């Protein structure tokens, strides 16, 4: 180490910043899968940001009327982990550096969303579609200024490539069996989990065995595909993919092992196994 180089006493870490929410988002989107990956017109159209009282925020909102859109800077408060590489919800199953994505699993759990401003009433901002869940703490509101914030011709690397691929027509029709539909509904209602949009997207493009798409042949007739902590079993006939059933991706021994409590969706996977016990392996003939 160069003895002339000054080192911070705190070990080189930059100072931390404590943020207080200025308000909380109120929406009918109670759980994460309802919130969408980014705001879309098809989503819940009327949401509210209610700013806290007693801070002079009514005044701070002065002159915001007349802006079509605002940026919200907010806290992914329902997450407590982050990962350097994340699996984007769309496109090929390939992990990307978290800073090249809008993943909620970030070292500084800050979300950034541009929303339509429909009106202002006292301390309440009436907002259009947004990708936040109910109760999300919001740290700041800033006007969206197209002259500074919009760069429609800017390249977006792997995202442009993926979007171009997704525009290609899909080749396969994916049909969920009655069992798979019941399992999907159970996961949505009891555990707020829904991996079927990604499942359908992947299978409708190419259901053939593939290592990174996590598709394997299970037996002469059936295949399975991994989607995060879950799996689906399916068959392929011509250009139709029949999803027979959903199932947890982790083996029971792994789910029950002490020290593995952080396995994604662990409790939901254990409950799923009780609801739909896996079939025992076929007994071998002597
Ligand atoms: C992909 S992120 C994008 C957020 C923001 N537009 C951005 O780019 O930073 C949107 C997802 O965050 C998740 N989400 C929404 N509110 C959250 C919260 N308060 N805590 C954790 N995750 C949240 C939902 O699953 C939603 O689909």
Image (cartoon, grey):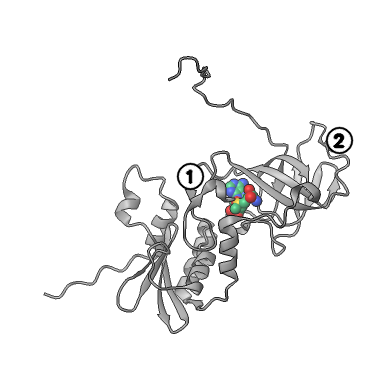
Residue 25 placement (x, y as % from top left): 70, 47
Task: Say which residue appears at 36% left-offset and 45% top-offset.
Answer: 260
Badge 2 local density, few (<14 within 10 Å), some, or many (20+)? Answer: few
Vertical position of residue 103 compared to residue 207: above or below? above
Along the horizontal axis of the image, is 84 left or right of 149? left
Q: CA distance from mark 2 to mark 1?
A: 40 Å
Give the mark, 2 or 1, whose residue is nearer the N terminus.
2
Vertical position of residue 65 compared to residue 235: above or below? above
Query: Which residue is identified by label 1?
Result: 84
- The total number of labels drawn is 2
Q: In the structure shown, which secondary structural element does the residue marked by tag 1 occupy?
A: loop
Residue 137 placement (x, y as % from top left): 67, 41
In the foreground, 180 or 227? 227
Task: Say which residue appears at 47% left-offset and 48% top-offset.
Answer: 85
The residue positioned farthest toward the bottom in the image shown = 238
Vertical position of residue 142 compared to residue 187: above or below? above
Question: Residue 160: in sight, yes or no?
Answer: yes
Query: Which residue is identified by label 2?
Result: 59
Badge 1 local density, few (<14 within 10 Å), some, or many (20+)? Answer: few
The quarter of the picture where residue 247 lies is bottom left
Task: Say which residue appears at 88% left-offset and 49% top-offset.
Answer: 66
| Marks 2 and 1 close (CB-CB < 8 Å) | no
In the foreground, 219 or 270? 219
Task: Say which residue appears at 54% left-offset and 66% top-offset.
Answer: 197
Residue 98 placement (x, y as % from top left): 53, 47
Q: In the structure shown, which secondary structural element does the residue marked by tag 2 occupy?
A: helix
In the foreground, 57 or 6? 6
């Amino acid at each position: 180490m160069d003895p002339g180089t000054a080192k911070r006493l705190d070990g080189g870490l930059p100072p931390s910043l404590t943020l207080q929410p200025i308000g909380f988002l109120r929406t009918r989107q109670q759980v994460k899968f309802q919130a969408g990956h980014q705001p879309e017109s098809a989503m819940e159209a009327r949401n509210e940001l209610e700013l806290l009282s007693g801070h002079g925020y009514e005044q701070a909102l002065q002159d915001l009327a007349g802006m079509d859109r605002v940026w919200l800077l907010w806290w992914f408060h329902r997450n407590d982990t982050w990962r350097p590489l994340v699996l984007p919800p769309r496109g090929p199953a390939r992990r990307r550096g978290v800073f090249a994505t809008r993943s909620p699993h970030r070292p500084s759990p800050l979300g950034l969303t541009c929303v339509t401003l429909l009106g202002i009433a006292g301390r309440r901002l009436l907002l259009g579609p947004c990708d936040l869940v109910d109760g999300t703490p919001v740290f700041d509101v800033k006007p969206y200024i197209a002259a500074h914030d919009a760069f429609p011709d800017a390249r977006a690397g792997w995202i442009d490539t993926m979007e171009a691929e997704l525009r290609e027509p899909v080749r396969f029709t994916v049909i969920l069996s009655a069992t798979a539909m019941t399992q999907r509904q159970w996961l949505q209602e009891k555990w707020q989990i829904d991996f079927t949009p990604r499942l359908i997207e992947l299978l409708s493009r190419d259901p053939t065995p593939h290592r990174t798409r996590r598709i394997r042949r299970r037996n002469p007739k059936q295949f399975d595909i991994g989607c995060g902590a879950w799996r689906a079993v399916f068959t392929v006939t011509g250009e139709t993919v029949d999803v027979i059933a959903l199932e947890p991706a982790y083996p029971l021994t792994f789910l029950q092992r002490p020290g593995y409590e952080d396995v994604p969706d662990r409790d939901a996977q254990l409950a799923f196994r009780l609801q739909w016990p896996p079939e025992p392996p076929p007994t071998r003939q002597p």
